[in-house]
Image: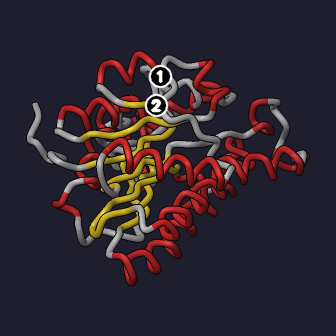
Amino acid sequence: MAYNLLKGKRGIITGALDENSIAWKVALRAHEEGATFVLTNAPIAMRMGEINKLAEQTNSKIIPADATSVEDIEKLYTEAMAHLGGKIDFVLHSIGMSVNIRKNIPYTELNYEFFNKGVDVSAFSFHKMLAVAYKLDALNEHASVVALSYIAAQRAYPFYTDMADIKAMLESIARTFGYHYGKHKKVRVNTISQSPTRTTAGSGIKGFSDFYDFAEKQSPLGNASAEDCANYTISLFSDFTRMVTMQNLYHDGGYSATGVSQEQLDNQK
């Protein structure tokens, strides 16, 4: 059901790889709620994914951009504003990559070249997207920027290795830039700490399936789906959350507030 929550709003959505992507679901919901937007991803990710299909479904333009390149990001904002006919009202940062995880390198033996690449792609890219928008004055007053995070930024999850540190940096950038953006431009910046979700990227983490089942038992409401996360993201893009900023918002069915569930205890007997 649509409520026209984003009617007349213009946006940029990054990271839509395929139908399993949270960004893909956000794009579909934003379209349903009346928004117009551009889609963007790195050229290599676009070749691997199905973004053209999503563009057709949402009547959106695709603007390729490497989020680690300031020049590409400047081009992205400039072309997006020209195509959409004005400043941007919402931005989704859904970009994450760890070479160390892909290569199953333990946290205690990290390859630092890979680590730096992960930081640049998954965290510095967020700062760059915010900094370029700030410099270009590309975001409207009361615009909303959301990045996707994970609870490993606050707690130790061995399988998440260097991405835990990277997500902690991502959330710190949201808080610090959120202060400056709020003070000077009335723009809000938040992160969503989502449940383990069966996306193409998430499923590539070793042991993901076992942990997904564990989190399902831990969470009173169960794991939040990609569709649920999209709905939550839309609420943060809407005018109903104009005073929410600098927050890391748990969207996890209660997982983050539960010490242990009765179901898990019962399974130990």
Residue type at mark 2: give it. Ile
Q: Earlier in the sequence, mark 2 or mark 1?
A: 1
The image position of residue 168, as x and y in percent, is: 61, 61
Q: Are marks 2 and 1 in contact (CB under 8 Å)?
A: yes
- Please name whichever residue, 60 or 158, is drawn nearer the observer in this view of the structure: 60
Q: Is 220 positioned to the left or the right of 168 in the image? A: left
Q: Residue at x 28, y 53 (%)?
A: 237
Q: Quadrant of residue 35?
A: top left
Please say if 224 is above or below 145. Answer: above
Q: CA distance from mark 2 to mark 1?
A: 8 Å
Q: Please give the label number shown on residue 22.
A: none
Residue with the mark numbered 1? 51
Residue type at mark 1: give it. Ile
The image position of residue 33, as x and y in percent, is: 17, 38
| Element carrying mark 1 | helix
Q: Crowding near pointer 1: few (<14 within 10 Å), some, many (20+)?
A: many
Q: Residue at x 44, y 23 (%)?
A: 20
Q: Is 27 positioned to the left or the right of 13 in the image? A: left
Number of numbered markers: 2
- Please name whichever residue, 5 or 140, is drawn nearer the observer in this view of the structure: 140
Q: Quadrant of residue 66?
A: top right
User: In the orientation shown, which residue stands out farthest toward the bottom?
Assistant: 183
Residue with the mark numbered 2? 62
Q: Quadrant of residue 140?
A: bottom left
| Element carrying mark 2 | strand
The image position of residue 246, as x and y in percent, is: 42, 71
Q: Is residue 2 among what the camera can see?
A: yes
Model colouring:
secondary structure
Please say if 210 is above or below 219. Answer: above
